[in-house]
Image (spheres, grey):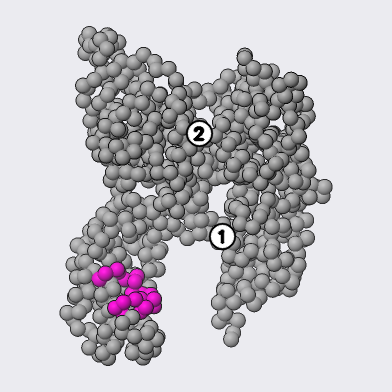
Amino acid sequence: MSKKDLSETDICDRFITPAIHDSGWAKNLIRREYQITDGQIVVRGNVASRKKPRRADYVLFYRPNVPIAVVEAKDNKHSVQAGIQQALDYATKLDVPFAISSNGDGFLLHDRTGLPGKLERTIPMDQFPTPAELWARFMEWRGLKPEQEAIVTAPDYATLGSKTARYYQQLAINRTVEAIAKGQKRCLLAMATGTGKTFTAFQIIHRVWKHGTAKRILFLADRNILIDQTITNDFQPFGGAMTKLDRSLVDQVSGKVETAYEIYLALYQGIVGAEDREAIYDKFPPDFFDLIVVDECHRGSAREDSEWRQILEYFGEAVQLGLTATPKETKYVSNIDYFGEPVFMYSLKEGIEDGFLAPFKVIRVDMDVDLQGWRPTAGQLDDAGELIEDRIYNQMDFDRKIVFPERTKRVAERVSEFLHATDPMHKTIVFCEDIDHAERTREALVNVPENQPLVTADHRYVMRITGDEKEGKAQLDNFINPKESHPVIATTSKLMSTGVDAQTCHVIVLDRRIGSMTEFKQIIGRGTRIREDYGKQFFTIIDFRKATELFADPDWDGPPLQVYNPGEKEPIAPPGDDGDPPEVTEPTSKYVVGGQPVDIVAERIQYYDKDGKLVTESLKDYTKRAVGEQFASLDDFLKGWKSAERKRAILEELGEHGVLIGALADMVGPDYDPFDLICHVAFDQKPLTRKERAENVKKRDVFAKYGETARAVLNGLLEKYADQGVEEIEEFAVLQLRPLSDLGTPMELVKAFGGKQKYLDAVRKLEIELYSDDVA
């Protein structure tokens, strides 16, 4: 067989893999078909599908956790350099310096380091670079010294069946360890909520701990639930070397703190002390900890007079690593001023595009009173008989200074309407202005007629989960546990905006104004986890307060922007803090105006598209546009459809562009072929049902030239088409299904046509007949 007749896989097996092996690359350092992403989830209507994952033909590793090169293969009909652009794309994403292309005749190596030397060079098959050659250049590229190599190449924690790092997590781990190896004392790691910051932190800690770079580590968080989740889950492998740092570790007689552990996890509020209790952290010597990791460090930790800052300054000689989903940069407070520029960033937008985070759609609901504002009549009293101050009240005032019970009722009705139209058991978080508003919203949701049977069956169907309410807080673990069905709807104000790993949260309701981009990103992060095993592929934001206008903010998921610029004599840390306001625990005085009618005047659905922007577009408009990008006219589509060897290929290509046949079927009807759904929605043609198309073929009696068995097979295929569609009859597996399996074995049925190729030709002619009617 000629080399040019070999498939790409054959070229890899016979030429490329042996050439790499022969240059000294061990088998465990050569990863074939290396999956980089999971494939972006595309949502239209209530139907979601995944794009294909991105896979590199080869990724070469210097050590099992240190990728160094990408190799893209092509069959021998292509040139040596044909795969280089694809290799460069993957190399850029993995941030490795070497991109290589091959067709089995030789290699083209592109060097991304920017170091002196030829940018691209052709290499014979027997001269593939050795690991040592590429590693020497890698070390120079990263500015690493020989004495730093041991920690940089130290292994990650891994056991049989344990979780392995995704590509961006490995990058975050490696870049942070490199920074520590180089002596950097303060590091910032910025990763979107849901992308595994704690797992990443565990691997960093484990690597430097096992290597001996850091012998004692302190992990700080500001929520007890975060500490407990971390100990139980990601940090569990530390075992007996780990403890929770609280007052139980302090000897009540001597006042000394237990120093026998190596990994300490602490709630910062519990160790800084207060008026009625002394601090714990300063019972350790200032040089006790080698590494301090600050979780959710955006929450005021960089402020000069913050309680976190006391701890960080006391252990000032330790390496300090800040973890955040939202690098905080305002004119008042800056994490970058304290920790420095992030050593690595992975945004929500990247997570969605890679398929690791759930995409979302936004439903914006406008009410008349929100748009128009409200002014009391002269001398109008509220429900308590208090004179209402005469001014125009707007959305900023609602549920803070003035309450319209009818507005709360309309919000509850709309949220319930959405849930019952999708799934009333989908877990939902309703963010309210304060605790009082959260309680009124809970009551309004309970009283919605559709919800009452569900509340009667289990009173936890709707619960207020706020900081002041023991019963609600006690149910928080059940809410975030995917295995627990209740509570279903949680009304809250601040408690659930951060640190709540609600993996199966399908709906986020915004009925509060959000002025802080930091807080907004945290709230959106409550829905970004994907749990396909629980039917969670995307989530929906229902916005009653125009909060999602923050998506248009240039700071949305962009790189951190430095705002504070200290002058020559000004302190490096900015004064003050515009951090998240505390949860309101005491209801403030508010006007309550009952009987004021409130109506919904506008509603629009928006999708977060592949470019990271919210677009307002109906399913029909989107489909028209997406199909139009592939086919200029109905005639072009008809030609493309009829000439396609397999219709599935066209449907997959359209699916890559967000055209979801399932969503179209939901809109038009389940009895139509994808061909008719597309013609109807994209080109305004009247559709025929699958059954109508099948009957039309039968009327034309086009099977007369075939023998009895072959005619029976074709009639069986028509039945399958009428029942399930064209994709079903294109697969050989259909011959194993009834009624076709009743006619004989697949081999016997194919033989009735004179062989496999003639069977395929008959199926092809059947498809031509099915679509000879075009559209009705």
Q: Position of residue 66 (x, y in %)?
A: 69, 54
| Outermost residue, right side | 147
The answer, for residue 743, to whether it is visible in the render is: yes
In magenta, the rendered stretch is 722-740
The amino acid on which the numbered mark 1 sits, given as a three-letter code, is Gln
Q: Secondary structure at mark 1?
A: strand
Counting from the top left corner in percent of width and height, residue 414 is at: 28, 36
- The structure residue drawn at horizontal position 45% and vertical position 46%, both measured from the top left corner, is 483
| Residue that label 1 marks | 35
Q: Position of residue 217 (x, y in %)?
A: 71, 36
Label 1 or label 2, whichever lies nearer to me, is 2
In the image, is 77 to the left or to the right of 382? right
On screen, 679 above or below 96?
Answer: below
Magenta stretch, main secondary structure, is helix
Q: Is residue 526 magenta?
A: no
Q: Nearer the viewer, residue 653 or 318?
A: 318
Q: Earlier in the sequence, mark 1 or mark 2?
A: 1
Name the mark on residue 427.
none
Q: Nearer the viewer, residue 467 or 417?
A: 467
Amino acid type, mark 2: Thr
736 sits to left or right of 482: left
Badge 1: how crowded within 10 Å, few (<14), some, or many (20+)? some
Left or right side of 209 for 165: left
- Is residue 113 depicted above or below 343 in this figure? below
Residue under the point 26% across and 54% down: 667
Quadrant hosting residue 410: top left
Q: Quadrant of the C terminus?
A: bottom left
Q: What residue is shown with label 2?
A: 498
Cα separation between marks 1 and 2? 31 Å
Residue 393, percent from left and from top: 31, 18
